[in-house]
Structure formats: C-alpha cells, structure tokens
Amino acid sequence: MNRLNATKDFWLAALRADGPALQDAVAETGPDAAVPACPDWTVADLTEHLTSVLRWVRELAPRGVLDRPAARTVPDPRPAWPEALDQLRREMTGAIETLDALDPDLPSWTWPAQAKKAGFWQRRIAHEVSVHRWDAEQAAGRATPIETKLAADGVNEVLDTWLPAGYRKGPTDLHGVVHLTATDASYEWFVRLRGAGIALLDTGTILDTDDHHPRAEASGTASDLLLTLMGRLETDKLTVVGDPRLISALRAG
C-alpha cells in the first residue's frame, strides 16, 4: 500500500476547488434533474444532503470534545430553490472557513474507530464534496474526474476507514486477495477479504504461490478506482483480472 502524505492544506485546497464546481453544477442543472449516481435522488435532494452535512460538521468539529453530537437534521419544509442554493453557498463557505481554522489534532468526535481528531473531518469533507461534485456534474452531463492525488487518498479512505467501520455495500461472504493499481499515479493497494473482515496490507508479498485464496486485480485511473469503490461506476470501467466479485466486495457506502 502506498501512504499518501495528505495534509490539512491538501484537503482544504481540494475543497476550495471542488466546492465552487459543485455549486455551479447544481445551479446549472436545476432542482428536479435526476442524479444518476444516486438512485431516487434529484439535484434538490443532493443539495439538501450536502447543506445539512456541511452545517452539521461545521458545528461539531470545533467543539473539542469526544461526545457524540446531536443527529443531523434537514429543514422541513424544504426551502425554495433560490434559497436552497444560497444556503448551500453559505454552508460551503462556512465549512471551509471552520475546517481551515482547526488544528488537525484538536479532539473531535468521529464515527470510525480511529484517532478522534478534527483532521478526520478535514479529510472526510474534502472527499464528501469531491464525490458529490462528480455526482452533480454527471447530472449536468459533464462529469470530470476527481483529481488524481485526491482520488488516491479517497481510495485510502475507503480501505482504511469506510470498510473497517462496517460501511460495506458489497458481499461480505467472500475470501480472497485484491490488488488495486492506479494507472495514472504510483499508487497500489493490497487487500485481504475474510468474509466480513478486511485487512489492508502493506506489501504484495501475500500474493505468492503458497496462497490459494481467490484473487483479483483491478487497474484504472485513481478517479475511476475511487468512483467504482463508492458505487458510482461499474467494475467494467476498470481492467479486471480474476474474480470481479472480489472487487465488488470493496464497495462502500
């Protein structure tokens, strides 16, 4: 596995790029357009979701405590579309300013079993916005890839955070080893599936002739790998050798 030395500045730079692009896409598309990557969602649903997530994180991340925050809420009734767009703009700006002001080591409640620090939210919101930016642009008919290094860190996040925390959408009864390769960057990952369990391996030495578990290898751009793991693309966007079900078992959500 390659460890990307991502930092607060890296994630905030991504947010500052993807945030305006997302807002442009939802404003262009309008509230009633379908979001193909999110079945049963309209652009209005996507906008409401993001606005509530950004508001929730903006309020919880600076608290400096580890107790669980109040549940995220959405307005009822939903505001008119011009107001919804303005709320998204305000919450995006506020979230970026809040996360930028935080020390990544500040104590913070987080949902996975990792270090409980504000840096988690700087990373999480960068990826939340980048993937939903892609969703919004797909709804507008002009989706562009996620930036390579950000996408590679997004693959890391799926494998080191989402899946170990139990957020798996793929099958949980498979055993085997998966090798993922980002063709546009020097990043690769080795993952062992043990049914409901998962282990992210530091090297590929497990892929030797003495290991008889099923194997699969998948290669593609870092963006396509991330979007596949996040359920936005099918595995046929990747070059797959071996059992494709093992790739599907890495889907998060």
Image (cartoon, grey):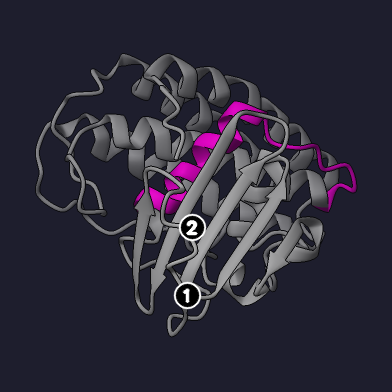
**Residue 129 on the magenta span:** no
Residue 89 in picture, x, y percent from top left: 59, 31
Regarding mark 1 in the picture, which secondary structure is present there? loop
Query: Which residue lies at the image location 57% right of the left edge and 34% below the top edge?
Result: 187
Q: Is residue 52 left or right of residue 39?
A: left
Read off the magenta span.
Answer: 139-161
Residue 37 in picture, x, y percent from top left: 72, 61
Q: Which residue is mark 1?
A: 212
Q: Amino acid at mark 1?
A: His
Query: Which residue lies at the image location 72% right of the left edge and 55% below the top edge?
Result: 43
Residue 148 in picture, x, y percent from top left: 66, 30
Q: Amino acid at mark 2?
A: Leu
**Residue 150 on the magenta span:** yes
Give the mark, 1 or 2, whose residue is nearer the N terminus: 2
Q: Specify whether residue 237 is in view.
A: yes
Q: Quadrant of residue 143?
A: top right
Q: Which residue is mark 2?
A: 207
Looking at the image, is 58 positioned above or below residue 213? above
27 or 239, which is in the foreground? Answer: 239
Q: Residue furthest bottom?
A: 173
Q: Is residue 150 left or right of residue 191?
A: right
Residue 116 in picture, x, y percent from top left: 17, 40
